[in-house]
Amino acid sequence: MDFGPHLLLAMLEGLVQASVLTLTALGLSLVFGVMRVVNVAHGEFFMLGAVLAWWITFLVGGPPALAFIVALLVAPLLVGTIAAAADWLVLRRIDYDPERTIVATIGLLYIIQQLTLMSYGPDARPVAPPFNTRLALPWFEFGSGGVQIYWPWGLSITSYKLFVIFAALLTGLALWAVMARSRLGLILRATQQDRETAQAFGVPVERVYALVFGLGAALAALGATLVVPIQQAHYLMGGDPLLLSFIVVIIGGLGSLRGTVVAAILIGMSDGIISVFFSPTLAKMLATLLVAMVLVFRPQGLFGSKPA
Amino acid sequence: MAQQKTDGLIAPTRRAVLKGVAATGLATAMPGHLYGATDEPIRVGFQVHRTGIGASYGRWYDRTTTAAARVINEAGGINGRPLEIIAEDDGTDPKRGAEVLEKFANQHNCDIAYGTLFSHVVIGSAPRAAELKLPYFVVSEGHHVASGMLNRYTLQPGITDVKSQVQAMAPFVAANLGKKVTMIYPDFAFGHNHRDFFGDAIEKEGGQVVAKIAIPPTETSFTRYFPQIPRETEVIYHVMVGPAVLTFVKEMGEFFGPSSPEIFGFIDSLEAVDLATPGLEFLDGSFFWEGHPRYAQPDQTEYDKFYREQVGVDENGASVDDPRDVSTYSHMFACWETLHVIKDGMEAAGYKGPQDRAALIEAVEAMTDMPESRAHPQGPKIFNGKTHQVFGVQYISQVNGGRLDVKHVTSIEDGLYPDEVDYTTQPL
């Protein structure tokens, strides 16, 4: 493949990956930002979203598009409810103590993973995409007769992958609107800035926490529901998203939503491009190196604020 | 009452503990008194991929093993003793695999160990089998047995190894599909067997491998690998394993679109996956290696029919209970056949207990011809006692409207190669 079309393909693949990663990492970042909770079970909520999406499309049946729309709405909602319940039952009872929440979420990780293995089983199961047309993409070259358009071999994307990018963009904008423009966003930001003062002003902090924990997990589940027609639902699929989300959140600055989006696109795109031209292992190595560099030279992350 | 029970669980009294110990002792001592020693079952430790990336194979290896054990027991067992399968999950993990062998030998008092598929688990477990002097019958198709890498206690009498398979495929690929081949394979021992042996085999036929693309078996996204396929490629040779095989094949179709080269795959890329899954239409007309034809063919043998019925597989290669539960038909026959080889070996050796393990290995090493039969439904085989490896026929099938039709059957001779080891010279 020529360099130009090759690069375009790499960028498109990277963008799809970056989209899903953005949603997943936003969830992790939101939970940390507002609650100061490092949620190690985040990847399992992602996996749970994919598995529930399979389960819902299986139960609904009918045309793939209808089943998928139901899954897209219901799976994140269910996962969010489960996460909020976990917050209420576990995290609240240990007072969100940093060390103990890490241990508790590790416990959650194993419970969710093993319950999935026991009920859903160890197989990878596919969800039919609502639509999936291959779109061949043109490229241009400067020949003797001026600019020529041609269709390089293999340069294509599917309509569904474009939809994933679009859906992630839309969700990101919606989240921004909620955080910046709504009363709910005001409450969340107030809780993030100063929990005690917020409580003094009548913010029901405990309920806000449950809501945020649920919302964070729902974002991961939404990312997973979007990706499951491309990949398949499997009980071990939560590992990579967790690692990448932590990388993104550390680079972007813990708790900074803007930083998370920028870092997710940076990591997703570079992972896509480096994987295509060199190897996926090198991409992971460079991402980890970047994390180390950020931690050494800018511990608060690219967009994080210095701790007071 | 309930309160008492809870107390007992958390802090058992001394009396309760003593009672429990006495009861356990009694229970363990009982069988010896009640049954004669000859009724003691022959225990086969079954190392199975219940979880991890090999789980779909594990499920079907389990069903096939259960069916074969039932058939053997219905026909009178082994040397008049019942065959008992003791299954342990190895998590498709080499470290766990070695631990499981340890459990078979020391906790379950197994006579032998058997069953593993994924090559990294075999390679991780086999040294422990030799240390434990536990005969270890693997069902893995890797070349690691015949290459001399393992030891005298490890045997593969049920399935042909990859080196032999690819050697038998190369003439067909070169003569019918094309000479310039790009290989896509999983980046671990099994895939490396393909990489190492297909290149030589295709060169003998006047072809060449123009690119080798290795993909980690845990990968979930594949489009990014495909631009490495050179434009001059005439044939794609693909073999993939792991939970994401369906994504792999679908994304390959999306990458090529209408201008695809010829495609030759090992069915591993779609084991346990329904060929009629949306997104796989582009495979129509392409060819697959099959170890054992998934779809019942018009010339189906009585043996295949019997085997299919006993395992519970319908004529499309799926479970008779659930047509969406597609089997790993090209590999699992080897569990059935291996258990029958174990039975024949134990009977030839007059196997009585662990003291006869060495005699069992020598008896299996002495085997040669294995004619097609109910015990060998996949086809006739020749066992090489020096390399501990069996050689059988291979099938080449074409995708036709969402099913596979056999187009060519290779001979056993097509897959033979010079010995690389003589395990019989190693001490037992």
Image (spheres, coloured by chain):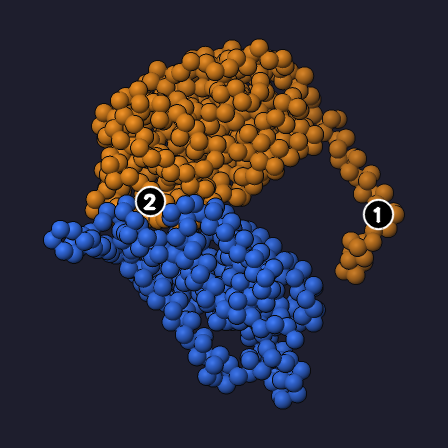
Chain colours: A blue, B orange
The kind of residue tagged 2 is Phe
Q: Residue at x 64, y 35 (%)?
A: B99
**Residue B207 seen in render:** yes
Q: Residue furthest left?
A: A145
Is label 2 in a helix, a strand or a loop?
Answer: helix
Nearest to the eye among marks 2 and 1: give it: 2
- Above/below status of A250 relative to B59: below
Please tell me how crowded label 1 is: few (under 14), some (14-19), or many (20+) other residues with Cα within 10 Å: few
- What residue is at 41 percent from the left and 63 percent from the top? A19
Residue at far bottom of view = A201
Tell me what residue is drawn at x 50 percent, y 71 percent. A257
- The amino acid at mark 1 is Ala
Q: Residues within 10 Å of mark 2 (few under 14, many from 20)?
A: some
Q: Nearer the viewer, residue B201 or A268?
A: A268
User: To which chain does the residue with label 1 belong?
Assistant: B
Q: Nearer the viewer, residue B406 or B287?
A: B287
Alpha-carbon distance for marks 2 and 1? 66 Å
Marks 2/1 same chain? yes
Above or below residue B398? Residue A290 is below
User: Residue A233's spot in the image, x, y percent?
Assistant: 44, 53
Could you tell me residue B191's position as x and y percent? 43, 33
Q: Is residue B180 left or right of residue A241?
A: left
Q: Which mark is residue B16?
A: 1
Q: Is residue B363 above or below residue A236?
A: above
Residue sitting at x 81%, y 57%: B7
Kindly state the secondary structure of the residue where label 1 is placed.
Answer: helix
Q: Which residue is mark 2?
A: B226
